[in-house]
Amino acid sequence: MDEKRDTRKYIEDHFREMRDYISKNVRDLELEKEFDKQTREITEYVDQNIRKIRGSMKESPEPGSEYITMPLIGDHAPSFKAKTTNGEISFPADYRGKWVVLFSHPADFTPVCTTEFMTFASMQDEFKELNCELIGLSIDSIYAHIAWLRTIKEKIEYKGMKNIEVTFPVIEDLKMEVAKKYGMVQPNASDTQAVRAVFIMDPKARIRAILYYPLANGRNMDEIKRLLQAMQKADADNIATPANWQPGEDVIIPPPGSCGTAKEIMESEEESKYCLDWFMCFRKA
């Protein structure tokens, strides 16, 4: 009797194991089918979008449209040769070892541009003292440039400035060759005029700062000069400048790169230094 009971128990246990094993495999199979289905759907979706992307990359721009490109901060400034009011220039070869402010304006004989050129011209010696040359650009011709600059000198008086002679070169860019290299023509603003762009280049012809203004608003030349001075100060002393910094004001010491350095900076008794916290230390002017 015991033997039969044991045999029956063994058979029941064996079939129970078989049932559990089969049930588990059925569930796994169903999950695997669902997984395979989802995998196929995801793969088809990805492949479909890859085909779309590849197709769009092969498409040509619509007639009359162009991709707008511009150099970025840290890039080497695009080189060019151009006819200007001071004769032909070759950039950057003719400006080796100098800082350069290259700025564009929409058109000659326009009021905002006239105020900008008069202001830049009145500050030209201040920029030269900072080893910086000015170069202007618009898509007008040399003859329009000359006529406009003569009008400025002979007829225009603005904020106490009169008899202002613009002696820095102004580029003729009728084919927009230079303007397009620097992303100065932006079709949503105008496809026939350059926006108010400013590129500041260092003596190694690297782009150090970029400013863009809309067509209707004049630039702040004092700010351009201040920014130039701030970059020169940062290069010379390995420091940074705080908000609204002006020459002669306190500067920022670069923050520490380790806990040990932070402790040394905080405990340092350097007279010209003061800290607001471990990461924010200044050097007195």
Image: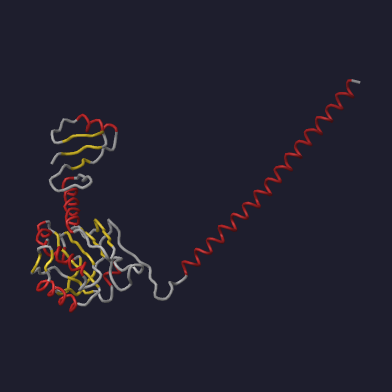
Is the residue 235 above or below the residue 70 in the image?
above
Residue located 31% across and 63% down the image: 70
- Tell which residue pokes out farthest to the bottom in this image: 143
Query: Residue 17 vs residue 175: left or right?
Result: right
Measured from the top left, where is residue 117 in percent x and y?
Answer: 16, 66
- Tell which residue pokes out farthest to the right in this image: 1
Q: Nearer the viewer, residue 217 or 47?
A: 217
Query: What colouring does the structure picture have?
Result: secondary structure
Query: Residue 56 vs residue 127: left or right?
Result: right
Q: Nearer the viewer, residue 250 or 244?
A: 244
Measured from the top left, where is residue 167 in percent x and y?
Answer: 11, 69
Residue located 88% across and 20% down the image: 2
Is the residue 10 above or below the residue 191 in the image?
above
- Tell which residue pokes out farthest to the left in this image: 163
Query: Residue 76 vs residue 11: left or right?
Result: left
Residue located 11% across and 68% down the image: 157
Q: Tag count in the figure?
A: 0
Q: Quadrant of residue 10?
A: top right
Query: Residue 115 vs residue 23: left or right?
Result: left
Residue located 21% across and 74% down the image: 172
Q: Nearer the viewer, residue 67 or 43?
A: 67
- Tell which residue pokes out farthest to the top in this image: 2
Measured from the top left, where is residue 116 in percent x and y?
Answer: 18, 65
- Quadrant containing the C terminus is top left
Q: Nearer the viewer, residue 125 or 54?
A: 125
Q: Quadrant of residue 62?
A: bottom left
- Quadrant containing the N terminus is top right
Q: Quadrant of residue 119?
A: bottom left
